[in-house]
Image: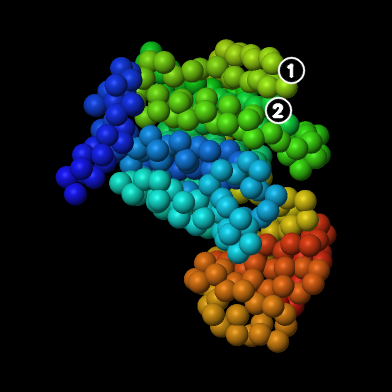
Amino acid sequence: MAMQSDGRMMRYARQRVFAPIGGAGQERLAAARVAVVGCGALGTHLADMLARAGVGHLILIDRDVVEWSNLQRQMLFDEADADAGTPKASAAANRLRMVNADITIEPRVLDLDAEAARELVGEVDLVLDGSDAFETRYLINDACVEAGIPWIYSAVVGAEGMTLNCHAPLVDGTRTPCLRCVWPDPLPPGSAATCDTVGVLNGAVSMVTGMAATEALKILLGSAAISPELRSFDQWAGTYEAIALPRDPDCPTCARGEYDWLDGAALGDAARLCGQDTIQIRPERLAGTRLPAIDLAAVAGRWRDAGTVQQGGDAFVRLRVAPFDLTLFSDGRALIRGTSDPATARSLYARYVGM
Ligand SMILES: [Zn+2]
């Protein structure tokens, strides 16, 4: 028993002897609260590193379920998760609880909307972007700037990666740029390469998240070494760049206080593509209001004769009707796999869930 607890005391030994952290820094990390939005390639790497580093409270947010094509780079998932189609946030939390039982890990299976984003920034010191959707990133930017907290943008595609500390406090009293200082508006749909079209290497994911995770520690410790630069690399070509970007004194968000995504002015459709052949339906956007929680067991009962039903406890229920499968969450949100046509997805939702 004594041996085992002595071992536990050594968990952060290599971090405590790192001078810029030390024992006092380790205590600060234990008291820190961080959200990771998106538990895909970026998010699983980031959450893994922060959990092992001893960040005391992690909130993991993801709207999706584990698929086989995720295993190549999404480090917290295994074959059993892909077979079961476990929600990513739950699977990541289960894995990380085995890695570090001394910290609190809170999974949330949801699609981050304005209401959830506002709530989230009130609960944490820092937000890490692990999403791959521009809407989510602009929403995170709005919510963090409004709440006055920093967040870290990370992106990866092919062998290239990019990261930026957004709205992070520097020791001279200024802040790093926010997302809209750098890109006032998102790129039009279809104009950028995505992981679905050009792929992604797990080494590039490791590199960009390694940089972001270290910046996260600096921000949580209030270090003077926080990077104010946009840093990018191409691992295949072997190039690296760091560009100093000043804040835009006329930035719509961090200068003028316009929160277009948070205010819903820039909200997306209720049905949207979520990967190559999956559509997400958000009924509260169709109805214009939040709906009461769905009784998933009752839905599973109604579906018995419609196809193959899989129950994931109180997290989700899934119906397979070839060539589709429909995963319904208790907030009424659904992922419909097997189509890239929003109209088809909407009609399946109407048929099996009802509006
Ligand atoms: Zn700005």
Q: Is residue 1 above or below residue 162?
A: below
Residue that badge 1 annotates? 237
The one nearer the camera, 147 or 215, is 215
Q: Relative to 12, say whether 287 is above or below.
A: below
Query: Tag 1: residue type?
Result: Ala
Q: Locate residue 120, reporting x and y percent.
A: 44, 47
The residue lying at 69 percent from left, 68 percent from top is 326
- Point 31% across, 32% down: residue: 12
Point out residue 158 in the picture as x, y percentages from the top left corner: 73, 31
In screen coordinates, is 237 left or right of 330?
right
* Sequence-first tag of 2 and 1: 2
Image point (72%, 68%), residue name: 325
Name the residue tied to disc 2: 159
- What percent of the width, then of the height, locates residue 250? 58, 22
* Residue at x 60% of width, y 80% of height: 299
In this view of the protein, can residue 322 be seen by the observer? Answer: yes
